[in-house]
Image (cartoon, grey):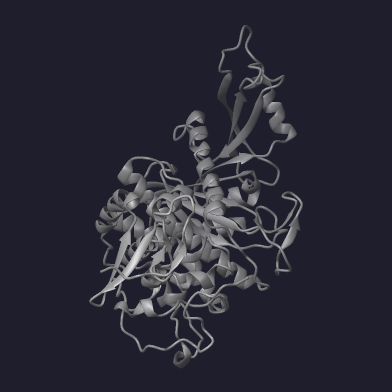
Amino acid sequence: MSEEQPLLFEPTFNRAVKVESRDERLSSDGGALLLREADHKLGLVEGLAQGLQDPRDPAKIRYSLVDLLRERLSSLGYSAGSDLDRLAHDPVLRSAVWDRPGDRVLQERLASQPTASRLLDVLSSKGNLERLRSALSDWVHRHMRASGGDGRVMRGTVDVDGFPVVVHGSQAGAAFNGYYQETVYYPLVASFSVDGDYDSRRAGQGFVHAILRAGDAAPAEGGLRFILNAVEKCSEFARVLDVRMDAGFTIGRIMDGLKARGIRFVGRLRTNPVLERLAAPHLRRPPGRPPKEGYEYTVELGWYQAEDWTYPQRVVLVVVDKPDPKTGQLELFPHYFFLVTNWEKEEKTGDELLAHYRRRGTFEDRWSEYNGAIGAHLSSPSFQENEAAFLLCLLAMNLLLILRVEMEISTGNGWDLRRLQQSVLRAGARVVTKAHQIVISIAAMVVPLWNRLTRRIGRWRLPSRWPLPRGARKRPWMPPPRHAHLSAALRC
């Protein structure tokens, strides 16, 4: 006999349709179970929490750092504050986030928005910030070794760039950036890809290093130290590493530092009168009617050394002389730019160098996906708390990238993060308890995709260098404070 539910709404267009209220049993975030399963198989949050210092009084702790971290990572993509109290009552999130066994997790709520915000205060110490930073590369490394065998790949590429994070308010370190015409933070981020190809559908993609900087920081400020740290973190990923970077980083002290250490790099080089004179003879169009697709070619300009460079570097001219898509006519003058590198011609030809550099564009697309799928709401007054929030956002991005790569491998198709969220993770679910078991029914439309993904996750084997995850464990149960709402409260 079915349980009678309170009638919420009876549409007039069809009296056979009845709308009942089952808030305590329904969820639109069934994918939180997939995130938790991937997290558990690789020991991601558990391994991160073990290295964090928790200054809170143990006798007053209701939510462990593991609980708070999982809740924060699962709720990113929603509004920073207004949605968190609602999500604290979501039955699937409670089942996935709580680090406790048994069905009692459904009887309690997750941390409130103020408690979740105080997590940033715990994470803002210098030691905890460095632990968060090192977790970026650790999570990528765990996924690579668990899914692809315990061995390094032959070649890998580290992409480095700075991106703006727009802020509103009086956050410490935020400043007006004349280039972006916004008040921003200007962090540096580094990402790793196998063979420099983000579309290769191989494990080993994700952010491996990041620092938050003031909004008025110069593009290459602290660039050499940052790149060297990123390369060191990725040294366990690949036998041979190279670096790709934008024009803001192709300055003397960075290129000299990389060449002195034998690190291969390629980057776009800002033009100057000397380079313009070297390029001029190669910009003349041949006589006759141009081909319909226009011209595109590379020219070796030889080794060039600016006044502030210690070492000469190889410069390649890239000419892109394409017709206008509307008129079909070539522009009055061809477009061109310069690539600078310490690769020898025997190692990479000009065309190979251009193809390798252009794959960097997918790295920039990843940042656009990050803004669309997660975004960084850096609203704390403290610079250190905002850096902790930023690193948590990148860790959430890495977790999503792990699932995206596995979906691409299993289906053979490309998946952007928004599609992954809407088609796989934002799955409707119904939760019931039976004989001290939690039974979660998932919408049928996502079952084929979940089957593919869970089969891939089931094949992961975490190498013995990382301790096996302990998983949920029994702890003394502390009731919520009296003022905590045990059911969702309406906020007007």
Given the current orientation, which residue lies at the most extreme top position? 288
Residue 485 appears in the picture as rendered: yes
Relative to 125, is 297 above or below? above
Q: For residue 433, which quarter of the picture? A: bottom left
Q: Position of residue 59 (x, y in %)?
A: 45, 93
Residue drawn 38% across the image and 62% down it: 35
| Residue 26 locus on image (x, y percent) | 40, 65
Query: What residue lies at 41% left-to-right and 55% top-to-bottom?
Result: 17
Residue 311 rendering spot, x and y as whole percentages: 60, 44
Please give left or right for residue 141 compared with residue 327 in the image: left
| Placement of 327 over or under 226, stated as above or below | above
Direction bottom: furthest residue: 59
Residue closer to the observer: 319 or 377: 377
Picture quadrant where residue 269 is located: top right
- Does residue 467 show up? no
Q: Is residue 283 above or below residue 140?
A: above
Quadrant of image for the C terminus: bottom right
Q: Position of residue 458 (x, y in %)?
A: 25, 58
- Residue at point 27% right, 52% down? 451
Q: Nearer the viewer, residue 433 or 207?
A: 433
